[in-house]
Amino acid sequence: MKQISGFVFSLFAYFMGTHIAYAHEAYVLPYTKFWDGIHEPLSAHAFAALRDPNNIRITSIIVVSVFALLGLNFLFRMSTWGQKAHAFLERFAKYGPHFVRITIALALFFSALSNSFLGPELHISAFPYAYLVRSVLFAMSGMIAVGFMTELAAFVGVIIFVGSLFVYGPYVFTYLNYLGELIVLSLFGMRMFSLDKYLLGPLKRFVVFERYGTLIVRVLYGLALVYAAITVKLLRPDLTVSVVESWHLTQFHWLFPSDPLLVTLGAGIVETVIGLFIIFGFELRLTVLISLFYITLSLLYFRELVWPHLLLYGISFNLLLQPEMFTLDHFFFKEHRLSMKWWKRPLAVSEQEN
């Protein structure tokens, strides 16, 4: 029993350690140092951590343990209690989009207030007509918050996002989660708890595609995580190593591996896997809960700015509540999985929910 408890504690400690390094480097490192690192050539140096046999042993144990955890959750999902727990969450699905709507409105407001776009490392001053962009962000946040001309406000947001690519380059893809929500709002607007409900009436266009709203948000959120993990942590590992060393994280021997490069590699791999699980909807609610826990832990530990993370919370709460539409979880766990051909199952949940 002591060996089992020690193993569980070690597993938890490893994940807590790697996810603390899950912190967004741009929010932890000095502005100039971060951008200098981003402009460095790509490198696969992070994988050099696996040259150490001890690091390989630790990594192997963690991989096996993760598969064991996924297996246990799989069995729980197949049980009556698991089905009831997930069905209970889906009862509140209609409130999910409002978490996203309010959090993106707040994020845009505080973004403009701090003279930045999407994150504190993207200064509005680098944009052409910076004063106008800032004013538009303030207006967008208010319009989305009260649901006034939501489609127009979100469409302008999409334009600004595309324009930011010409200012900051592909790094902006780390904020694809914003783009996903802006696309959905520009297409379908908001007809619940909004002024548009009374001014514009029910949604009359794109109604047949509205069921794909959560899918768009989910996939772009997952892509944002994968892109950030690969391009920053895995291919520019010096940035994350700098975070580990600046905060002396390896001094906590019970929590972190002694090799900063292994911490970096672990954080990059974990973030990539989380992103892929979200994209494909595999063990989705478990993945989102784990992600939320460690995002919160990172916020508390590094004392990062809260507002850039608001949308992550909004999207996560929404994914916890939405039916498992167009996901691998739906393929595996829905009650009609044995009575319906596999290629019909993703569409069936849409028909049932609507």
Image (cartoon, rainbow, N blue to C red):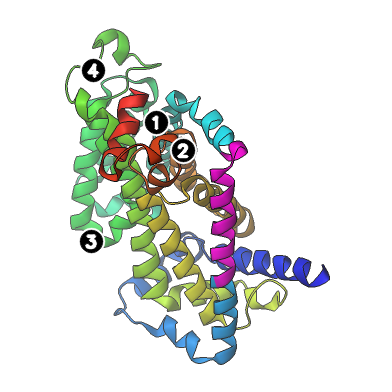
> Vertical placement of 298 versus 216: above or below?
below
**Residue at the disc numbered 1:** 101
> Vertical placement of 41 versus 341: above or below?
below
Magenta span contains residue 97: no
**Residue at the disc numbered 2:** 314
**Residue at the disc numbered 3:** 169
Amino acid carrying label 1: it is: Arg
Quadrant into which the C terminus falls: top left
Give residue 197's quadrant in the image: top left
Tell me: 137 left or right of 34: left
Q: Which element carries disc 2, helix, strand or loop?
A: helix
Q: Which element carries disc 1, helix, strand or loop?
A: helix
- The disc, 1 or 4, on the residue closer to the chain's N-terminal end is 1
Give residue 225's quadrant in the image: bottom left
**Residue at the disc numbered 4:** 203
Amino acid carrying label 4: it is: Leu
Q: Residues within 10 Å of mark 1 (few under 14, many from 20)?
A: many
Give the distance between the C-alpha atoms of the residues marked 3 and 4, in whole angstroms. 35 Å
Amino acid carrying label 3: it is: Gly
Q: In front: mark 1 or mark 4?
A: 4
Magenta span contains residue 80: yes
Magenta stretch: give its range: 64-82
- The disc, 2 or 4, on the residue closer to the chain's N-terminal end is 4
Tell me: 30 left or right of 204: right
- The disc, 3 or 4, on the residue closer to the chain's N-terminal end is 3
Q: Nearer the viewer, residue 186 or 135?
A: 186
Q: In front: mark 3 or mark 4?
A: 4
